Amino acid sequence: MAAVVLTGGTGVRLGGADKASLELDGRTLLAHALAATTGVSETVVVGSEVDTARPVRWTREDPPGGGPAAGLLAGLDALAVQGGLVCVLAVDMPRFSAATLTRLVDVLESAGDSADAACLVDGGGRVQWLAGVYRYDALAAARPADRAEEHGMSTRRLMSRLRIVGVPAVEDEAHDVDTWEDLRRLE
């Protein structure tokens, strides 16, 4: 199992702050994401390179600023082992934990061939595509045939061909940090 952690957002609602470097409970949001994915064999981080407590591979979508779908696909391309399961995690979900990851893997494996992914569903009923576990082959097959279409492509469009099992979030594990208020709420 591998992980792709997306850190490249613009943080517009945070006044341009780098989400990956924001701190919660004495750790950066990137450190939280890396702790949640400690058990995977390989982690690719899509975004600007910074020091991390454990080895990761870094990449960016080309050109940068292509959005989360383009970043996710760049992360898939950077994986050394292309197959198996892939955890996809946005850096701004600090309550996503190793236990969350295990639960998603269990749900996906229980679904067998009837599902391509298991993703958290937040309290409002929205599937959190950037907090899930995917079958690599299904996610790669969802990619547009013309790679030029990836830049600016919506995550909804990328995921529209996948069979996703929704897994209700427990407490704040699907809560993302888009504003300073979101961060204060988690403190």
Image (cartoon, rainbow, N blue to C red):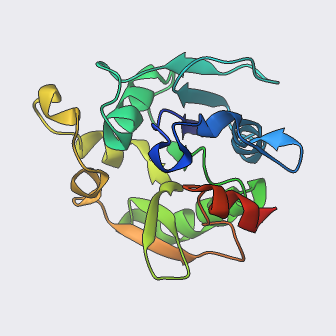
Q: Position of residue 114 (x, y in %)?
A: 36, 69
Q: Residue furthest bottom?
A: 124
Give the side of residue 87 with respect to residue 76, left or right: right
Which quadrant of the structure image shows residue 66?
A: top left
Q: Residue furthest front?
A: 15
Quadrant for the N terminus in the image: top right
50 in relation to 117, above or below:
above
Q: Residue furthest left?
A: 146
Give the side of residue 137 with respect to residue 110, left or right: left
Most foreground residue, 42 or 150: 150
Which quadrant of the structure image shows residue 60?
A: top left
Quadrant for the C terminus in the image: bottom right
170 in relation to 23, above or below:
below
Most foreground residue, 187 or 122: 187
Q: Residue furthest right?
A: 26
Which quadrant of the structure image shows residue 45?
A: top right
Instruction: Write the residue at 67% across / 31% down.
Output: 41
Q: Position of residue 156 (x, y in %)?
A: 27, 58
Instruction: Write the residue at 60% across / 49% down.
Output: 92
46 in relation to 177, above or below:
above
Instruction: Write the residue at 69% across / 33% down.
Output: 21
Give the side of residue 63 with respect to residue 46, left or right: left
Q: Position of residue 146 (x, y in %)?
A: 10, 30
Q: Position of residue 107 (x, y in %)?
A: 57, 69
